């Protein structure tokens, strides 16, 4: 890997559950994600993919290890600072779209901008319209999100993830709830936007074709990354453990 | 507009039925609070105005001297000096006391009164009455007697020393009207004949049933009193400060001095009790509204768990999340209080028009209300506090939801 590292983690440890149900979900995971690159995390269900994603997205606290975003170690910052960095530096895309149902597509995209508070109302509208135009939803700005199709909702989620021009985009099975045609379309769109805008993308997926289209594929098993492969070299394992 | 306020408005307006239910509770709580306070205080205020208007805000009577008791030791829990006094009937140095009294800024006017108990007769009816020997000019300044006349003329009384003014209930009892004659039995056993020049209605039942106003000099001869006045009635600029002035005058003039608050303590306690009782009852309504809001907002939090997780993932802080629900509470409290105040004013106006026939402690033909901004203030404050408490718990619950639990539950 070369280029500027947007997100990295070192020796992440995470236990989930209590007492007898306690599970060692992450076991010393380390990763580097560069700007303008697409990384996929693959592995069987329950191997710790989503846990890793939420920890890297500052939504969950690791039991040990460090997280570095934009050259800053953010592991020990308070919750308020984590919220600020999530708002400024990270964009999330979830499997089930997770749009605000009572709000229009445009309002959903404006939601992170409202928290950031850098733009006026009209500037936020213009930016939301431009982002929705980029994901081919320029004609559905005022439509309530519940009245959009699954593929359209996922494209709104992609536009929303880019709302505050974050350095890192984290996607948890972004195409997991879409049919093949919509999956390919959503991923192609996401990949183009990430590459064009120099973002770093880390996505968790079960979809082999999507994983193969990423610059790096990280295989996880039992809370460990057992191998990381650059595109086209799946099979030549670079161990990160 | 801040992001939490914007989201709160959208959340609230998307749950119209829940919002409406919460609003109804606050609106009615505030309105009924205002309305009941206006009524209970309305009757109390009428009574206070009537008693001050007829008997003064403060009364100075009975001269006293400290009693010196050598080695006597005051018993525990006694007021000491008050119990060691010798009282002398009547007011001494009336003119001097009145002259000095007028120097006080709170004193508007004062009038000497010679008071005594006699018996009045008209036809076959007899009644024990309280005769007030007054100086008409001074009495007009110190009381509302002129405005209390409902039959006859005050001038007919002023210009005729053998005329009297009697309370309307007494007139009814003796079956006399203005221009008729009554007889008053002096302590010496003689009947004195007077003309009823006017009939007065103070609004206070006991005054209207017992009082007879006569000229001071005539009353002095009738009662065979050696002194000019048995009391001095005061009209004060600020009647609420009567107790302080009464204490001061008692020290200054060495005469027992009583404020209207002390004089009417029993009745005032009844009114106060009624007012507090009404306030407690209505506060319970507002409290119930608070429970309703608590339920509505708790349900709102539960139904918005997904949205809360999304907002947190977008970088909304815990305080932003709690603010969203506190703003919803503030919206309910603000709009509910405003509408409640308007409804309270309309209800108060409507109730003031309801006919009611009261002829006991008070005289009134319709419900008495008082318009006081403090009722609106307290009702609003109570609603705001109740709604804040009701919103705080759900807002904290929302703020402490772990977004990862929601996201994990939906994605694994």
Image (tube, rainbow, N blue to C red):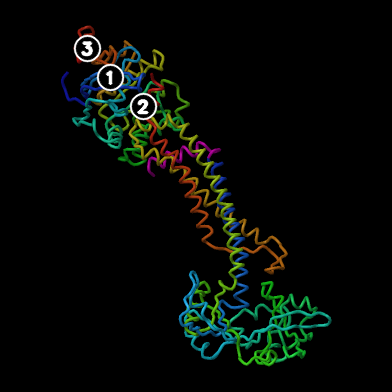
Using residue B14 as the reference point, say whether residue B170 is left or right of it. right
Q: Residue at x 52, y 81 (%)?
A: B85
Mark 1 crowd level (few <14, some 14–19, many ≥20, 10 Å Cα): many
Q: Chain of mark 1?
A: A
Tell me where residue A145 sits by quadrant: top left
Task: Confirm whether circles 1 and 2 share one chain.
Answer: no
Q: Which residues are magenta?
A: B1-18
Tell me where residue A128 sits by quadrant: top left
| Label at residue B404 | 2
| Label at residue A229 | 3
Using residue B184 as the reference point, say whether residue B300 is left or right of it. left
Q: Residue at x 52, y 54 (%)?
A: B379
Residue at the right extreme?
Answer: B124
Mark 3 crowd level (few <14, some 14–19, many ≥20, 10 Å Cα): many
For the residues labelled 1 and 2, the Cα–Cα distance comes to 16 Å
What is the x, y in percent for residue A29? Answer: 23, 19
What is the x, y in percent for residue B330? Answer: 46, 46
The verdict on residue B7 being magenta is: yes
Dot 1 or dot 3, earlier in sequence: 1
Q: Give the residue number, with chain letter if any, for mark 1.
A: A26
What is the x, y in percent for residue B217? Answer: 65, 92
The verdict on residue B102 being magenta is: no
Q: Nearer the viewer, mark 1 or mark 2?
A: 1
Q: Chain of mark 3?
A: A
| Label at residue B242 | none
């Amino acid at each position: 890997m070369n280029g500027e590292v947007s997100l990295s983690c070192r020796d992440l440890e995470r236990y989930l559950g209590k007492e007898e149900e306690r599970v060692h979900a992450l076991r010393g995971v380390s990763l580097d994600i560069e700007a303008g690159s697409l990384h996929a995390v693959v592995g069987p269900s329950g191997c710790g993919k989503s846990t890793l994603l939420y920890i890297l997205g500052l939504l969950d606290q690791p039991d040990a290890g460090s997280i570095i975003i934009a050259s800053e170690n953010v592991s020990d910052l308070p919750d308020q600072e984590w919220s600020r960095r999530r708002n400024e530096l990270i964009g999330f895309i979830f499997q089930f779209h997770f749009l605000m149902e009572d709000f229009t597509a445009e309002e959903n995209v404006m939601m992170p901008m409202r928290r950031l508070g850098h733009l006026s109302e009209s500037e936020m509208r213009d930016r939301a319209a431009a982002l929705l135009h980029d994901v081919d939803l320029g004609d559905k700005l005022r439509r309530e999100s519940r009245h959009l199709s699954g593929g359209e909702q996922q494209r709104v989620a992609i536009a929303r993830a880019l709302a505050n021009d974050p350095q890192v985009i984290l996607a948890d099975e972004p195409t997991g709830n879409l049919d093949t045609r919509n999956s390919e379309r959503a991923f192609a769109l996401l990949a183009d936007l990430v590459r064009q805008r120099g973002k770093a993308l880390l996505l968790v997926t079960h979809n082999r074709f999507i994983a193969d289209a990423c610059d790096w594929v990280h295989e996880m098993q039992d809370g460990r990354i057992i191998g990381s492969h650059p595109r086209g070299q799946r099979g030549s394992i670079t161990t990160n453990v | 507009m801040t992001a939490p306020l914007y989201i709160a408005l959208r959340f609230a307006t998307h749950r119209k039925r829940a919002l409406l239910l919460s609003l109804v509770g606050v609106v009615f709580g505030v309105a009924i609070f205002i309305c009941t306070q206006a009524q209970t205080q309305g009757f109390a205020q009428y009574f206070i105005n009537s008693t001050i208007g007829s008997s003064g805000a403060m009364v100075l009577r009975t001269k006293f001297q400290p009693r010196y008791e050598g080695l006597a030791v005051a018993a525990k829990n006694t007021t000491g000096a008050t119990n060691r006094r010798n009282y002398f009937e009547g007011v001494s140095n009336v003119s001097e006391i009145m002259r000095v009294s007028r120097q006080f800024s709170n004193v508007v006017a004062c009038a000497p009164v010679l008071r005594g108990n006699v018996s009045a007769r008209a036809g076959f009816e007899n009644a024990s009455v309280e005769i007030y020997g007054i100086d008409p000019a001074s009495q007009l300044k110190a009381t509302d007697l002129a405005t209390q006349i409902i039959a006859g003329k005050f001038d007919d009384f002023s210009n005729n020393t053998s005329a009297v003014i009697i309370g309307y209930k007494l007139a009814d009892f003796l079956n006399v009207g203005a221009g008729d004659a009554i007889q008053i039995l002096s302590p010496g056993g003689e009947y004195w004949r007077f003309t009823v020049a006017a009939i007065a209605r103070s609004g206070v039942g006991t005054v209207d049933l017992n009082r007879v106003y006569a000229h001071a000099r005539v009353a002095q001869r009738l009662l065979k009193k050696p002194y000019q006045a048995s009391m001095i009635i005061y009209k004060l600029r600020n009647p609420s400060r009567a107790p302080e002035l009464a204490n001061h005058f008692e020290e200054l003039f060495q005469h027992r001095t009583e404020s209207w608050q002390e004089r009417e303590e029993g009745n005032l306690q009844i009114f106060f009790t009624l007012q507090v009782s009404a306030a407690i009852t209505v506060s319970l309504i507002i409290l119930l509204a608070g429970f309703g809001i608590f339920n509505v907002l708790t349900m709102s939090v539960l139904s918005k768990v997904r949205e809360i997780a999304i907002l947190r993932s977008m970088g909304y802080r815990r305080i932003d999340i709690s603010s969203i629900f506190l703003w919803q509470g503030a919206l309910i409290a603000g709009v509910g209080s405003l509408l409640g105040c308007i409804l309270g004013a309309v209800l108060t106006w409507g109730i003031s028009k309801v006919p009611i026939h009261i002829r006991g402690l008070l005289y009134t033909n319709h419900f008495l209300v008082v318009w006081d901004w403090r009722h609106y203030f307290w009702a609003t404050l109570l609603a705001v506090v109740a709604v804040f408490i009701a919103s705080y718990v759900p807002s904290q619950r929302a703020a402490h939801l772990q977004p990862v639990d929601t996201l994990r539950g939906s994605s694994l």
